[in-house]
Amino acid sequence: MLNQVYRLVSPRQFEVETVAEEVDADDLIVRPKFLSICHADTRYFFGQRSQAALRAKLPMALIHEAVGEVVYDPRNEYKPGTLVAMVPNTPVKKDSIIQENYLPSSRFRSSGYDGFMQEYVCLRRDRAITVPSDFDPHMAAFIEMVSVGVQALTKLESTMDEDQRVIGIWGDGNLGYITATLVKQIFPDSQLLVFGRHQSKLDYFSFADKTYLVDDIPADVKVSQALECTGGQGSEAAVQQIIQHIQPMGTAILMGVSENPVGIDTRSVLAEGLTLRGVSRSSREDFKRAVDILSSSPVTRERLQNLVGYVQKVSSIQDITNFFDSALTNYWGKEVMEWDV
Ligand SMILES: NC(=O)C1=CN([C@@H]2O[C@H](COP(=O)(O)OP(=O)(O)OC[C@H]3O[C@@H](n4cnc5c(N)ncnc54)[C@H](OP(=O)(O)O)[C@@H]3O)[C@@H](O)[C@H]2O)C=CC1
Ligand SMILES: O=C(CO)[C@H](O)[C@H](O)COP(=O)(O)O
Ligand SMILES: [Zn+2]
């Protein structure tokens, strides 16, 4: 099959390449429909990674948050037109200990492998998750980010001590908001505290028990467990505040991506017996749990609807470039492309 792949060849420069794809019985052919931008994509688009990283990764199709319609299934198990969420991580090896999203051999689309900005995606069939018909497709476009929140809270469940009284989230943006909605489902009896830098963003977290501006946290505020959802230069201050406000023997899940090393007050980590656990990407199981949680919780789907920030049809490379540029000034919510290229 000849396929048009829209690759970022250098910062802000997309080009279309014709690629010959081998399709076998284990694959599906999916037409991307709605694609959602992640900060990982904008770091490549704006050249906000080291020259070495850009040289290693580009050219590459961006986007790893997307839903699409099945157009061809060699096994006829999927009806044409079925909307599926596409799992960007493709494991090529199995490991009895290391999960698929941490296996170095796994292929993650839009990080060394072509992402979903393609005319058609040749998708291994175990990488497709059917989207229930009562899901809004614009919200469904970022199910991948919801699956990362599931991965984080699943790891918290398996790492934390018994203290479930107070869950703290640092980060008042997309990832913090998604993770906060999931905390209400996975830890329904816990108090949810959210710590952010913008009151106008914290106001969206109406379902949290309390929100705090990070420059105005009372010294006696304590959380049992914490999740860092900031990234960039904000991570260092967030981790430091988590260390200051977490109970001894608490667990902090680290999710924010920084291009530079982050300083950590290890003396306090030792003294308080803290656990820091890094979480990245997600697995098919996380996607399935994310869809199950959303299916059983209309209120969570409604909350996530608040994160659909900006939807725009794109029909040309210029439209795509303009869309990515607009992401720079988009203040709240996810940017979703209606893929018409
Ligand atoms: N681990 C994974 O697999 C994944 C990681 N990520 C990463 O997570 C990070 C967040 O992504 P996303 O939510 O989309 O980004 P957003 O920019 O939407 O949200 C981050 C928010 O955190 C705020 N912030 C910055 N510093 C602090 C602080 N010290 N305490 C509290 N809040 C702070 C930011 O404010 P301001 O803008 O003023 O700095 C911003 O409002 C990124 O690095 C992204 O790459 C995303 C998806 C998956
Ligand atoms: O956003 C993410 C997952 O949803 C990850 O942070 C992203 O995949 C990291 O990739 P890279 O190392 O290329 O920045
Ligand atoms: Zn991402």
Image (spheres, rainbow, N blue to C red):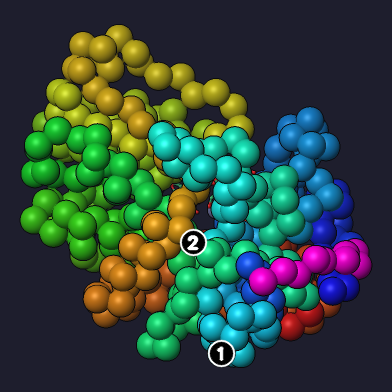
Left or right: 221 with respect to 23? left
Pick the residue in front: 292 or 200.
Answer: 292
Q: Is residue 297 visible?
A: yes
Observer-nearest residue: 217 or 296? 296
Q: Secondary structure at mark 1?
A: loop
Q: Is residue 38 above or below residue 27?
A: above
| Above or below for 225 versus 143 | above
| Corner quadrant of residue 88 | bottom right
Q: Is residue 32 visible?
A: no
Instruction: Report if residue 295 lies within the magenta region.
Output: no
Q: Write down the quadrant of residue 23 in the picture.
A: bottom right
| Secondary-structure class at tag 2 | helix
Q: Quadrant of residue 217?
A: top left
For the magenta stretch, what is the residue range? 17-25
Number of the label disc, if any, that sits on residue 79: 1
Image point 67% across, 71% down: which residue?
25
Q: Residue at x 28, y 25 (%)?
A: 275
Residue drawn at x 23%, y 65% as measured from the top left: 206
Give left or right: position of 100 versus 56. left
Distance from mark 2 CB to nearest ligand 2 atom below 8 Å:
yes
Residue 86 as seen in the image, left or right of residue 54: left
Amino acid under label 1? Lys
> Looking at the picture, does residue 226 appear above or below residue 75?
above
**Label whose residue precedes the other's in the sequence (1 or 2):** 1
Q: Residues within 10 Å of mark 1 (few under 14, many from 20)?
A: few
Residue 157: x %, y % from top left: 22, 44
Q: Position of residue 140 (x, y in %)?
A: 47, 74
Around disc 2, counting alpha carbons within 10 Å, would you say few (fewer than 14), some (14 to 19), or many (20 or more)? many
The amino acid beneath tag 2 is: Glu
Asked if residue 68 is positioned above or below residue 264 in the image, the reply reads below
Residue beneath label 2, please? 144
